[in-house]
Amino acid sequence: MAGQIVLLGLIIVGVLGRSSIIATAACILLAVKLVHLERYLPGIERRGLELGLLFLTLSVLVPFASGRIGMKDFTAVLTSWQGILALIGGAAATYINSKGLDLLRIDPQIIVGLVLGSIAGIVVLRGIPVGPLMAAGITAILYKLFRLVSGGS
């Protein structure tokens, strides 16, 4: 019952915050619970991130498949400062995501703070949720910086 109340709260926050992604995800999970399909929750948890990343990658690769991005665009990336910065940014983001995955494996309960922080970022800052890995990666960096500044543990 507590899980259903939390999901209902997330639906309300998503609607009020104009975040259709949060509201839709909470609605789907609430429906799964209400029709007693909880046995699928571990699979959704385990494979949901992979499916989300798959669809995100598909949407990013559509311009390649449709021919809107061609070989001349590849050479432009390698010969312009914006393209080189994009390459560095992409490499940095994937590295940060890997650190986020490490943090989630070591400290899985941190997801509560990540979700609440993401909701606050959506509602208050009008941000766009790109996923828990990036949020966890940034958290891992902040954690290391905090340890460095505070002198250790």
Image (cartoon, helix red, strand yellow):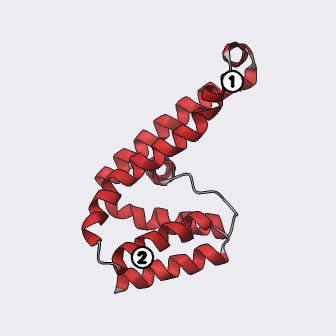
Quick check: 28 above or below 57? below
Q: Secondary structure at mark 2?
A: helix
The percent position of residue 83, horizontal first and vertical second, equals: 70, 23
How many numbered markers are drawn?
2
Mark 2 belongs to which amino acid? Answer: Leu
Q: Residue at x 38, y 46 (%)?
A: 101
Quick check: 21 above or below 99? below
Gap in angstroms between the C-alphas marked 1 and 2: 40 Å
What residue does disc 1 label?
A: 69
Q: Secondary structure at mark 1?
A: loop
Q: Residue at x 62, y 26 (%)?
A: 64
- Is 28 in front, or is 108? 28
What residue does disc 2 label?
A: 30
Is tag 1's residue or tag 2's residue first in the polypeptide sequence? 2
Q: State whether residue 66 appears in this view.
A: yes
Q: Mark 1, residues whose alpha carbon is within 10 Å: few (<14), some, or many (≥20)?
A: few
Q: Mark 2, residues whose alpha carbon is within 10 Å: few (<14), some, or many (≥20)?
A: many
The percent position of residue 149, horizontal first and vertical second, equals: 50, 50
Mark 1 belongs to which amino acid? Answer: Ile
